[in-house]
């Protein structure tokens, strides 16, 4: 028997958009989220502003949550994870382990919206001292500081005078197996750099990069103002290590444009960590039997013109479960996955009754 | 009276996906295309391969066309353009001028999928000699050559030995008012460079760039193989002019990494032209009364989390009508626009009958 419900796994921006989109076009959705709350990384990691313009993240994500929780066609299961999958496309049964124990959830199609995890910048190949020096932090740590309106050096609680961002930490790096670009870090770092310059007008803020990937409007909306209005210093270069020097940090590398080694003292070093598949993405891919690419993200089996199909019929994916994605990419591909899932169920229903 | 049809203006990849998506979830669509055929730029300009992997473009786009023309819920109007708009959200009437003269089309919502036009590299501020030297061509000219499996110097019909791409022609350029990045040109140029190297193994191929914006998987899927497997030469630099030298072209500029001026002789120069709003995008925006941004693209009024809303209720936009977009962006935002349009009509119908 075919089932007219779509299960959406993951309650971040992608899952929220997918579930609401399904409901908007007359479908039924069950949204399964492992955390006790909806909203995903922007809420869990306390994002400050949304790239590119820096509108506060929380109210915008909460609006998406409200749309979902208010809609009678979406059933939300918090604190819940999928532990088993049986059945077949059109008539899957997921075992969902939640507050009330294991429960079966029948669904005709599944959307995987399990997102990414930040690259762990403490991996041994990374010489940046993330777990060694308190004043070496990552993009998401700074987001939380910006949300609290308190950007300080963790070592002494004082506002930093000199801050730098190191780009491509965990991205474009064959040594660690992440040859891809994580897409959003150039934009996010630049947005955060602007926010620091606004909050601490006497600070100096540097961004060390390989290429500034400010695609589309991010170029004119972030990159130009960062340089011209907010005086963020962009330096094309490779940082090879971060060392302690007195109570500051010594950042060493090469200024590629000047063709010379550089050493700069900093109060706060922000590692622009890339995206890796979340543990949920890896686990759910295995349970559903969908192919993952060599990096562990869900393999987009349909190519650029069908970006949400997976290797299994009836199973679709969206957002950063498929690979690096910004928020706009995520909500767009979520809508694409919603259409595909609803359409899949309609075509099966038509085949049965036709 | 409310109307349950969505008018989709533009029959390129975005419009095709939007129209099919509407039909997939039970809606009705009218697809209005000014050309006598569907498929948009990839067909009109004879694209060879789709970025990143270079699968032949035509059969993939034709598959999208077939889905639309075969669907009973989509009505296609070829050789047709919108000349007037009346009514209001929920009950618009478009005047569509086509082979049978002016005809009214009633629709409850509109999706603008009118796409982009290539930047004209002959504008007077551009010192590249596009209209002066036959061997200076643009990305889309090379696509057509690649489709014909004949990459030659237009001046003499001989295969070129030395080819270069000049990036950011018409993009990232305040002088001409296009401060944005056109997003796809780095990937498209690199894909074309690979195709030339495969077709003409003795050629040397250079790409002069500011930043290589190979976001996401384009990094590992195009940029690394271009360098390592296909030996495309990437040079960070600015090209300031192209001159004639004997029967070749002299390309002059600065090698930024080496910090010195450079002069190179080339047989074929390819200008990586950016995207500008198509004349259709500008015209339709005015007719519908939706806000355009300073560049003339449709203004995305809803921000990153609602990327297909325009300034007018009931009017949505997708793909490159909103700004630089790759094909994946385009089909994703088209699905997003389809959901929004269908949902808008459903909510109005519910309000009327409820």
Image (cartoon, coloured by chain):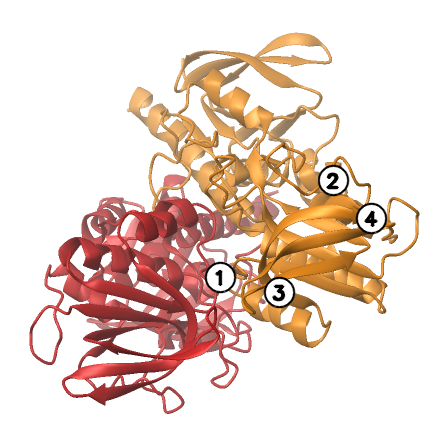
Chain colours: A red, B orange
The one of A156 and A84 positioned closer to us in this rendering: A156
One can see residue A280 in this view: yes
Q: Examine the rendering and report whether any part of residue A305 can be seen.
A: no
Residue drawn 70% across and 68% down? B232
Mark 2 → mark 3, Cα distance in angstroms: 32 Å
Q: Which residue is mark 3?
A: B235
Mark 4 in CB contact with mark 2 (< 8 angstroms): no
Binning the other alpha carbons within 10 Å of mark 2 as few (below 14), some (14 to 19) or many (20 upward) gives some
Q: Residue at x 33, y 41 (%)?
A: B303
Task: Identify residue for label 1.
Answer: A91
Read off the residue under disc 4: B145
| Chain letter of disc 2 in the image | B
Q: Are marks 4 and 3 on the same chain?
A: yes
Q: CA distance from mark 4 to mark 2?
A: 14 Å
Picture coordinates of residue B246, whole percent (x, y): 86, 50
Q: How far is disc 4 from disc 3 in space, using C-alphas?
A: 24 Å
Residue indicated by mark 2:
B43
Q: Which mark is residue A37?
A: none
| Disc 3 + disc 1, Cβ < 8 Å | no
Counting from the top left corner in percent of width and height, residue A11 is at 30, 60
| Location of the N terminus of chain B (image quadrant) | top left
Q: Residue furthest left?
A: A157
- Chain at numbered mark 4: B
Front: mark 2 or 1: 2
Mark 1 or 4, which is nearer the eye? 4
Per the model, the C-alpha gap separating discs 3 and 1 is 54 Å
């Amino acid at each position: 028997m075919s089932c007219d419900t779509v299960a959406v796994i993951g309650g971040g921006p992608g899952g929220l958009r997918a579930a609401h989109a399904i409901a908007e076009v007359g479908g039924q959705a069950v949204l399964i989220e492992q955390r006790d709350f909806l909203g995903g990384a922007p809420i869990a990691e306390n994002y400050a502003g949304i790239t590119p313009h820096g509108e506060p993240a929380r109210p915008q994500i909460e609006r998406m949550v409200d749309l979902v929780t208010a809609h009678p066609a979406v059933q939300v299961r918090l604190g819940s994870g999928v532990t088993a999958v049986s059945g077949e496309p059109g008539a899957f049964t997921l075992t969902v382990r939640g507050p009330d124990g294991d429960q079966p959830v029948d669904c005709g199609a599944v959307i995987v919206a399990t997102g990414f995890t930040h690259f762990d910048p403490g991996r041994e190949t990374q010489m940046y001292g993330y777990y060694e020096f308190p004043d070496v932090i990552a993009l998401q740590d700074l987001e939380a500081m910006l949300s609290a309106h308190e950007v300080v050096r963790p070592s002494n609680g004082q506002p930093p005078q000199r801050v730098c961002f190191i780009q491509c930490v965990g991205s474009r790096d064959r040594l660690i197996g992440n040859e891809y670009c994580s897409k959003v870090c150039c934009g996010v770092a630049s947005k955060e750099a602007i926010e620091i310059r606004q909050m601490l007008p006497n600070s100096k803020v540097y961004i060390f990069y390989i290429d500034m990937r400010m695609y589309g409007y991010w170029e004119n909306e972030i990159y130009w103002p960062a340089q011209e209005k907010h005086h963020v210093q962009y330096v094309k270069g490779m940082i090879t290590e971060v060392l302690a020097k007195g109570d500051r940090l010594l950042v060493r590398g090469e200024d590629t444009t000047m063709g010379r080694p550089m050493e700069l003292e900093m109060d706060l070093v922000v590692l622009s960590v890339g995206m890796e598949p979340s543990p949920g993405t890896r686990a759910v891919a295995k349970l559903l039997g969908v192919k993952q690419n060599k990096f562990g993200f869900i393999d987009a089996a349909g190519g650029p013109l069908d970006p949400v199909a997976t290797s299994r019929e009836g199973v679709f994916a969206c957002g950063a479960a498929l690979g690096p994605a910004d928020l706009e990419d995520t909500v767009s591909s979520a809508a694409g996955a919603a259409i595909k899932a609803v359409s899949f169920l309609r075509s099966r229903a038509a085949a049965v009754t036709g």
